[in-house]
Image (cartoon, rainbow, N blue to C red):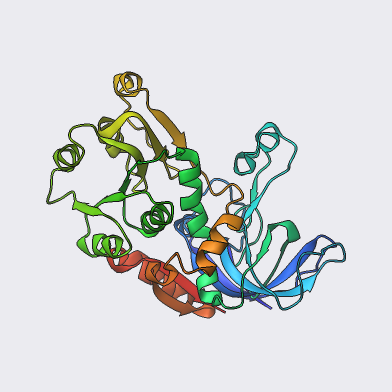
Amino acid sequence: MKSLVIKEPNKFELVDKAMPECGKNEVVVKVAYAGICGSDMHILHGNNPFVVYPRTSGHEFSGVVEQVGSQVTHLQLSEHVVVDPVINCGHCRPCRNGRANSCLNLKVIGVHQDGGFAEYQVVPASNVYPVSKEVPLQQAALVEPYTIAANVFDRLRPCDGDSVLIYGSGVIGLTLVQVAKVLGIPSIVVDIVDEKLAVAKALGAGRVINSREEDVEAAIMEMTDGEGVPLIVDAACIPSLVPQIMRLAAPAGSVCLLGFLSEPSELMQMEVIKKELTIVGSRLNNKMFAKVIPWIESGQLNTEAIVSHQFAFDDFSSAVQQLETSPAETRKVLLKF
């Protein structure tokens, strides 16, 4: 079989490998489609501290069950599936408290072990979820990004009548808009690219703001009668935005921060305390596949809208070029196997 191997930062090759062996509690998946995530690009360029090279990345993928381990009972050969990349130990304090994605011994498929940028991959059966064959595998490959959004709202704990302010209308921002719509939460989206904002609007954002053309704080305060927004998500991952985010959060509001950034952010403690804000992080997903898959199967999520380009698996270099040279017009890029 062929596998895309990142040998070292900025060096990748398509190599021939032996077919993976299937353990008794494992499944071999014949990969159909895989999405390229920002974290895959970080691995490619040597900016992910958790990776040991060589590595086959890819944590957003769909496929067909090729082999089933002897102890696996919930999956069948030829079944269409998606793979949750989060592998937890089940024994540490976070795991015991229902926070598998914060596991002290966390492993992520495509980061700590080889992932979906290969024709076949072996994965724990407990991480594999069946998907209706009525859902094209191209769309099924997008389940994982939507679990990121679902996890954000799980962390925010929205109340009836809440609205959400989303900074950034990239792929994660667009999944947040759609999940907010499914949950009945009105959304406002801020970005600097009109084309991306137009997509957010089409997917259900009630209001979009181009921060290069409009004063975000003035607009939000006018819209909310000076109260601010109950829920805010920073999907732009820009440290300089944090002070504004805290100012725009409503009293008793919740803020969710995303992204692995090493640069410090300025946090005005008074804003947090006087409004008793809740500030949370969200990493990966915590058992959200079972929630998101039915949304996709029922057509509540427009997965096609977040995909802008598709390339053959063996044309990875063109996919990388697209992502790096045309970021404003590029959303999710899929690899087809």
Which residue is painted at 39% across and 34% down in the image?
A: 254
Instruction: Tell me if 42 is positioned left or right of 8 in this view.
Output: left
Residue 222 on image: x %, y %: 15, 39
Q: Is residue 303 found left or right of 162 in the rendered image?
A: right
301 with respect to 203 (left or right): right
Of residues 2 and 36, the one nearer the viewer is: 36
> To which quarter of the image does residue 179 belong?
bottom left
Residue 96 against residue 205 in the figure, above or below: above
Number of marks in picture: 0
Rendered image quadrant of residue 60:
bottom right
x, y percentage for residue 180? 39, 52
x then y, percent, for residue 166? 32, 47
**Which residue lies at the image location 51% right of the left edge and 62% below the top edge?**
295
Image quarter hosting the C terminus: bottom right
| Residue found 18% across the figure and 53% down from its top | 210
Q: Residue at x 76, y 76 (%)?
A: 77
Q: Quadrant of the N terminus?
A: bottom right
- Looking at the image, can residue 120 be seen? yes
Residue 265 in the image: above or below residue 205: above
Q: Is residue 18 visible?
A: no
The quarter holding residue 275 reads top left
Above or below, 247 relative to 37: above
Which residue lies most toward the front here?
Answer: 160
**Relative to 28, is 103 above or below?**
above
Q: How far from the left and from the top, in percent, is residue 25?
A: 81, 60
